[in-house]
Amino acid sequence: MPSAPPCALVLFGASGDLAKRKLLPGMYELAREKLLPEKFALIGFARSEMTDEAFRAEFRTAVEKFARTKPVDQAILKKLESCVYYQQGDYGSPDAHAALTKKLEMCDATHGTANNRLFYLSTPPETFAPVIENLGKHAATLGRRADDPAAAATKPAAGWRRIIIEKPFGTDLASAQALNAQLHKHFRESQVFRIDHYLGKETVQNLMVLRFANSIFEPIWNYKYIDHVQVTVSETLGVGSRGGYYDKSGATRDMVQNHIFQLLALVAMEPPTSLDAVSIRDEKTKVFKSIRPIRADQVDQFTVRGQYSAGEHAGQKSDGYTKEKGVPAESRTETFSAMKLFVDNWRWSGTPFYLRTGKFLSEKVSEIVVRFRSPPLTLFQKQCETAVYPNDLIIRVQPDEGVIWRINGKVPGGQMNIKSVKLDFLYKETFNVEPPEAYERLIFDSMLGDQTLFIRGDEVEAAWAVIDPIEQGWLASKVPPHGYKPGSWGPKAAFDLIEEDGRRWI
Ligand code: BG6
């Protein structure tokens, strides 16, 4: 693989948790794999007072602690440290942004970063607006829009400018539209990289390979052969110290609108005409636009929201969600969300998609199950003591990444007994490697300017358009979130949602 072109990466929110756990170690891994450009500089930007030296020490500590591959190669780390800098300032401060511009120019001169700039916003959402406005004002930092005739007349565009934005991208359709409008004042869509880290996961990318590089799936990938699809993204921990942030969001905004919808889109989309970003994102957007809206007055029929009660699980104890730090006692924010959706197009006519996610559940697992219809004739029923199970295709995103087919096989012996057996492809066994961290791939792609694994502006809006009426329905609903015990699989109502249709969670 070619390494990325020379560039300077400005990391806003450099002292944050995501930076320490994922982004800084991710840059080290890219350097180790020789994918980071030879001519590279990293400028951490945050509010805390810190010298370049102190930030380098933080960088080192983060890599030593969280690098995916150990032991850390000291020579690589030392070389990387020599191109790390820090800029202190308020996110909205013009002075801090002016100082940042100077540092970037210094990086061009010292490290040969060629006036290519990647701005990574790993900050709380309320800081997005001031940062974007400041990047816009500091034309020297930002570069002009190539389609701005005034700029084109004065100064030829040199180098590139890209902006990466962490989630949450808005909290509803209106706020996502406002954020898009603000971005588009200063950046063309081709410069904007909206992150959903699920798209950087190896198994999620494998979904496209599975569907479109194998000829056996496409003919049966529709309502005629598929009974329903389930997506489960469950987590074992409660909200812990994130209560303040989480209470404004809830499981649906935090997980469904983005991660789970991306999984759904990759399962449901039509084959793209090519693998480029435009074709793939066109197809995913079409899926969101085809989802049948759940009207506000239908939420109690098609959705279930839950809130964990007091309990202990996975080494964490809680007095219940509404007792968590930063959570109001009367909060109705859901820590569990389940819904039944329909994609109203030719392929998926009448096929339910059941989605569920939650905190403090039994296991940490992200999994898609495609359940096929039962054979048209129940030939074995009379001879068989055991039941004949329908076929499942299980796409395990994490942990134990892989793909499993559940089929029926004959139990050896004189009798005709049938057992559900598994054919599996597990990443670790097949390739003998741990898949890389999602962020490594995403940072690398943004340096290459490849937007395929990032969310487009109209795509994020289409996803919010599905979620908005559900949130509004919940606001108006008289049914409060259902309680569930930490360590369970969510409230009973979530079982009823699927079992009333004669199906069950797998
Ligand atoms: C984040 C959510 O986007 O995804 C968190 O904000 C959640 O609440 C996390 O814990 C889950 O990511 P993963 O990769 O561990 O499944």
Image (cartoon, rainbow, N blue to C red):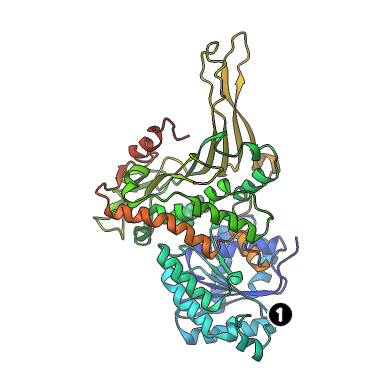
Residue nearest the observer in this picture, 357 or 257: 257
494 versus 24 height, above or below:
above
Q: Residue 104 at what x, y percent from top left?
A: 61, 82
Which quadrant of the rendered structure holds the N terminus?
bottom right
Given residues 137 and 308, the one toward you in this image is: 137
Q: Which residue is outermost to the bottom?
A: 154
Residue 41 visible in the snapshot: no
Residue 218 occupies quadrant? top right
For this rendering, which residue is in front, 359 or 196? 196
Q: Left of 168 or right of it: where is 33?
A: right
Measuring from the top left, give residue 267's x and y in whole percent: 57, 46
Alpha-carbon neighbours of circle 1 within 10 Å: few (<14), some, or many (≥20)?
A: some
**In the current view of this chain or complex, which residue is farthest to the right?**
2
User: Label 1 amino acid?
Assistant: Gly
- At horizontal 39% and vertical 57% (from top left) the residue drawn is 468
Looking at the image, residue 125 lies above or below residue 85: above
Q: Residue at image x 53%, y 51%?
A: 287
Vertical placement of 180 versus 368: above or below?
A: below
SS label for mark 1:
loop
Question: Residue at image x 65%, y 81%?
Answer: 107
Looking at the picture, does residue 382 appear above or below residue 243? above
The percent coordinates of residue 425 (x first, y second) are 65, 37
Residue bearing the label numbered 1: 112
